[in-house]
Amino acid sequence: MGSAMKVVNNYMGNVLAVLTAETVNLAEAAGLERDLALSVLRETAAGKGMLNRWPNKVWAGDTSPGFMIDLASKDVGLGLELAYQLGSPALTGAGARQGQSLARMLGYGRQDNSALYLAMRDLRQGKTPKA
C-alpha cells in the first residue's frame, strides 16, 4: 500500500507540475506579468486545488452544478485556442479536454465538474461513452 500511495502521489504532483508549467507559459505568452498571474491563481479555485473542494461535493454525493462540466469544457477549449494562437504548449489542457468530452458522453455534462471523478470511475469500471 505504501508503494501504491507513493506512485499515486508522485503521479499527481508531476502531472500538476506540467500543468503549472503550461499555465505560467500561457500567462506569459498572453502578456500577463508572471508574479501577478501567480498571485491571482493562488486565490482561485484553480490554485487552491480540487482535493480541498471535492470532499464536500462529489464524495458527499452532491454533483449539483457549482460549475458544470459543459462550461468547464468550453473554458478549456478557449484556453486551448489561446495557447494555439500564441504558440504555447498545452499538452495537459488537451488531455483535460478529452477527459471532459468523455464525461459529457457519459452524461455528466450538466453536473458539477467534480463529477469528472464519477466519469473516470465509470471508465475504469468499463462503462462505454455514447457518441
Image (cartoon, rainbow, N blue to C red):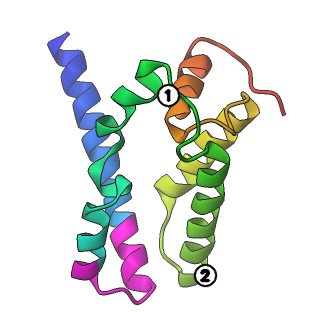
Instruction: Name the outermost residue toward the right.
Output: 131
The residue positioned 35% from the left and 38% from the top of the image is 53
Q: Is residue 121 magenta?
A: no
Label 1 crowd (10 A; few <14 / some 14-19 / many >=20) = some
37 w.r.t. 68: above or below? below
- Residue at which label 1 appears: 117
What residue is pinned by disc 2? 85
Answer left or right for 13 relative to 54.
left
**Which quadrant of the view contains residue 40?**
bottom left
Quarter of the image where one finds residue 115: top right
Question: In which image quadrant can residue 130 be found?
Answer: top right
Q: Is residue 31 magenta?
A: yes
Q: Secondary structure at mark 2?
A: helix
Q: Amino acid at mark 2?
A: Gln
Judge by depth and name the residue closer to the eye, 37 or 44: 44
State the residue in front, 17 or 67: 67
Tell me where the magenta segment starts and ends, as one range: 23-36
User: Looking at the rendering, in which quadrant would you find the C terminus?
Assistant: top right
Q: Does residue 65 appear to the left or right of 61 in the view shown?
A: right
- Residue 28 position in % (x across, y down): 36, 83
